[in-house]
Amino acid sequence: MLYKIDFKLLGLLIIGFVLATIIGTVSHEYGHYLVAKYYGYESAVHYGYTSMHHPLGVPKLTPLQGFFTIAGGPLQTFLTGAIGLLLLYWNRKAIKMAAALSLSQWVMVYVALFWLRFSFNLLQGIPRWIKRGHLRGRSDEIRMTLYLECPSWLVSVSLATIGVVGLSIVLFYFVPIKQRFTFMLSGIIGGVFGFYFWLYGIGPILMP
C-alpha cells in the first residue's frame, strides 16, 4: 500500500509541479528585479534570468549592492518557502486529520517546496564539482561566494541543506502516508519536465 500509485492524483500533482516550477522560476527572478529597481537600474524579468542596465546619472553598484542584487532571488525563494511551511504549521491539525490533502493544502505544500530550488541547483553542479574539485557556474549561489570570498561550495551546500530539511518536513510530516509515494513520483516527473518545458521550451517564447 505504501508504494501504490494513485494515477489520477499523480497526473494532477505532475501538473502542479510543472506550474510550481514555472511560478518559482519567474518569482525568483522578480527578487533580483526588485532589488535592482531599488538601486535605480533599468531591469526586466525574462524566462530564466533578469536583465539589468545601468542608466545615465545612476551610480554604479557597489560590491555590497551587487551582492544584494544577486541575493534578492534566493531571498525571495527562501521567504516564499518559509511562508509555505508556516501555513502548513498553522493548519497542521486539519492536515493531520485528513486522509487526503485538499486543493488548498496541496497549494501550501507547493509553496513550501520553493526551497527545493536550492537543492536542485547543487545537484546540477555536483558532477562538475567531482570532476574539477570545486563548484563553478552562473547560479546565484556561486556568484554569491565570489562576493563573500568563501569556498565555492559553502553557499550552495548551506542553501541545499535548507532545501532538503524543508522537503523532509513536508514529506514526512504533512503529506499523508498513502499519498507519499505518488507525491514523490510526481515531483521527479513534474519537476524535471517543468524545468525543461519552461527553460528550453515555452519560456523563451513567452518571456524572451
Image (tube, grey):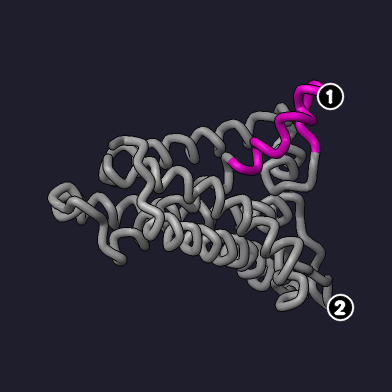
Residue 107 visible, this orientation? yes
Amino acid on which disc 1 is placed? Arg
Query: Which structural element holds mark 1?
Result: helix
Q: Nearer the viewer, residue 48 or 186?
A: 186
The rendered magenta stretch, by its main secondary structure, is classed as: helix
Quadrant in which residue 21 is drawn? bottom right
* Segment tinted magenta in the rendering: 120-136
Quarter of the rendering occupied by the C terminus: bottom right
Residue count near mark 1 (Cα–Cα under 10 Å), binned few <14, some 14–19, many ≥20: few
Give the percent coordinates (x, y) of residue 107. 37, 62
Quarter of the rendering occupied by the N terminus: top left
> Circle 1 sits on which residue?
132
Q: Nearer the viewer, residue 14 or 53?
A: 14
Give the percent coordinates (x, y) of residue 148. 70, 37
Q: Nearer the viewer, residue 46 or 6?
A: 6
Q: Nearer the viewer, mark 1 or mark 2?
A: 1
Query: Which structural element holds mark 2?
Result: loop
Amino acid on which disc 2 is placed? Leu
Q: Is residue 86 left or right of residue 132?
A: left
Quadrant in which residue 22 is drawn? bottom right
Q: Is residue 52 left or right of residue 141?
A: right
Q: What count of labels does the image hold?
A: 2
* Callout 1–callout 2 Cβ contact below 8 Å: no
Mark carried by residue 56: 2
- Residue at 67%, 43% in the rendered image: 141
